[in-house]
Image: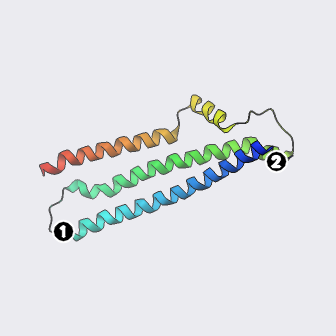
């Protein structure tokens, strides 16, 4: 069984999105490592300067925030791969078309109506934690 040009295009776009998302996860891992190392390096090289104790927790906070984003990306890849498995791999492997509704946006919309999106929630939580962290530092650092 061959895919229609529309389905072939959708299949390729979803494969490309998964690949780009994996690349972004790799970037998040590097940013997490480099930002943590940079903060610790700065703290250790400026031992004569009085810094607030919370500064030593910043790398862990950044790892948590980057991890939340990566978790959302992993969830996105899982959703895409489930869609591809349910729609395209069955069709390509068996040659039999099933009574399945195609359309990535339709599938994603129905999925989001059933349950909330981990991707959206993890990014929202990351921004809230980032904001709370910055507010905490802005309030506590001048007091020390």
Does 112 sit left or right of 86 as displayed?
left
Query: In the displayed structure, would residue 20 be above or below residue 112?
Result: below
Report the residue that reaches farthest toward the front.
5
Query: In the displayed structure, would residue 12 be above or below residue 117?
Result: below
How many residues crowd around disc 2 within 10 Å: few (fewer than 14), some, or many (20 or more)? some
Does 27 sit left or right of 127 as displayed?
right
Q: What is the distance, in whole Å, between disc 1 and disc 2 at their CAs?
A: 62 Å
Residue at 62% x, 36% y is 108
Tag 1 and tag 2, C-beta contact below 8 Å: no
Checking the image for residue 47, the label placed there is: 1
- Percent position of residue 29, x then y: 46, 60
- Percent position of residue 141, x then y: 17, 51
Which mark lies nearer to you, 1 or 2? Answer: 2
Read off the residue under disc 2: 92
Q: Judge by depth and name the residue closer to the eye, 113 or 64.
A: 113
- Percent position of residue 7, x then y: 75, 43
Q: How is the image coloured?
A: rainbow
How many residues crowd around disc 1 within 10 Å: few (fewer than 14), some, or many (20 or more)? few
Does 2 sit left or right of 13 as displayed?
right
Report the residue that reaches farthest toward the top.
113
Residue at 52% x, 56% y is 24
Residue at 66% x, 38% y is 104
Q: Judge by depth and name the residue closer to the eye, 100 or 8.
A: 8
Checking the image for residue 93, the label placed there is: none
């Amino acid at each position: 069984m061959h895919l229609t040009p529309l389905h072939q295009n959708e299949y390729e776009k979803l494969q490309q999105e998964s690949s780009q998302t994996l690349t972004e996860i790799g970037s998040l891992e590097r940013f997490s490592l480099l930002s943590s190392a940079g903060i610790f390096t700065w703290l250790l090289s400026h031992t004569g300067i009085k810094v607030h104790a919370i500064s030593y927790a910043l790398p862990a906070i950044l790892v948590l925030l980057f991890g939340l984003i990566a978790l959302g990306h992993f969830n996105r890849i899982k959703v895409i791969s489930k869609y591809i498995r349910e729609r395209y791999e069955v069709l390509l492997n068996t040659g039999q078309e099933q009574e399945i509704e195609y359309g990535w946006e339709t599938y994603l919309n129905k999925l989001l109506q059933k349950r909330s999106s981990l991707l959206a929630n993890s990014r929202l939580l990351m921004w809230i934690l980032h904001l709370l962290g910055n507010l905490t530092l802005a309030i506590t650092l001048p007091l020390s």
